[in-house]
């Protein structure tokens, strides 16, 4: 069965939408759709696994706790986030949905 990453994308949502695409003991692949959301100012992700994430559509700013300036991400940009590296979503585009592909792995 073929599925398209850009099918059924909400143009507006109150919260980010996380959809698991593939899950196993060692990898978790998800599509994330953001429509202007950001992490709360005092919130930091601190995940036990590494995460490789790419912006497929839209744009975002990703902030790492030990960096002063956010990382500006545009379509096609990707970053590998080591396990337990504290980070947050500083912003996502409001004009178009930001579609992320995230691969969590050990």
Image (cartoon, grey):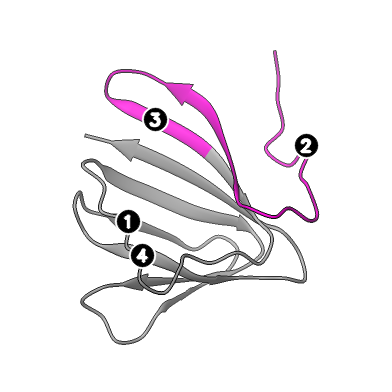
Cα–Cα gap, marks 3 and 1: 16 Å
Query: Which secondary structure lies at badge 3?
Result: strand
Q: Which of the labelled discs sits on residue 43, or is there none?
A: 4
Task: Kindly report which numbered mark, 3 or 1, lies closer to the viewer in this rendering.
Answer: 1
Q: Judge depth for marks 3 and 4 and give the one in front.
A: 4
Mark 4 touches mark 1? (CB < 8 Å): yes
Which label sits on residue 57?
none
Residue 106 position, x and y percent, is 21, 34
Q: Which residues are magenta?
A: 1-30
Residue bearing mark 1: 45
User: What distance separates the C-alpha of mark 2 from that of mark 3?
Assistant: 20 Å
Q: Residues within 10 Å of mark 1 (few under 14, many from 20)?
A: some
- In the figure, residue 92 lies in which quadrant? bottom right
Residue at point 77% right, 36% down?
A: 7
Q: Quadrant of residue 11?
A: bottom right
| Label 4 SS | loop
The residue identified by callout 3 is: 28
**Label 2 close to label 3 by CB (< 8 Å):** no
Find residue 7 and name its label: 2
Are the residues at dot 3 and dot 1 in contact (C-beta closer than 8 Å)? no
Tell whether position 14 is magenta: yes
In the depicted structure, whether residue 75 falls above or below residue 50: below
């Amino acid at each position: 069965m073929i599925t398209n990453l850009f099918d059924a994308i909400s143009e507006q949502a109150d919260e980010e939408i996380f959809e698991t695409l593939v899950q196993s003991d060692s990898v978790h692949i998800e599509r994330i759709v953001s429509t202007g959301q950001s992490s709360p100012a005092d919130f930091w992700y601190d995940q036990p696994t590494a995460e490789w994430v790419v912006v497929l559509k839209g744009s975002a700013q990703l902030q790492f706790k030990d960096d002063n300036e956010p990382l500006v991400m545009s379509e096609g940009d990707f970053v590998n986030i080591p396990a337990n590296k504290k980070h947050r979503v500083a912003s996502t585009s409001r004009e178009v949905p930001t579609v992320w592909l995230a691969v969590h792995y050990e």
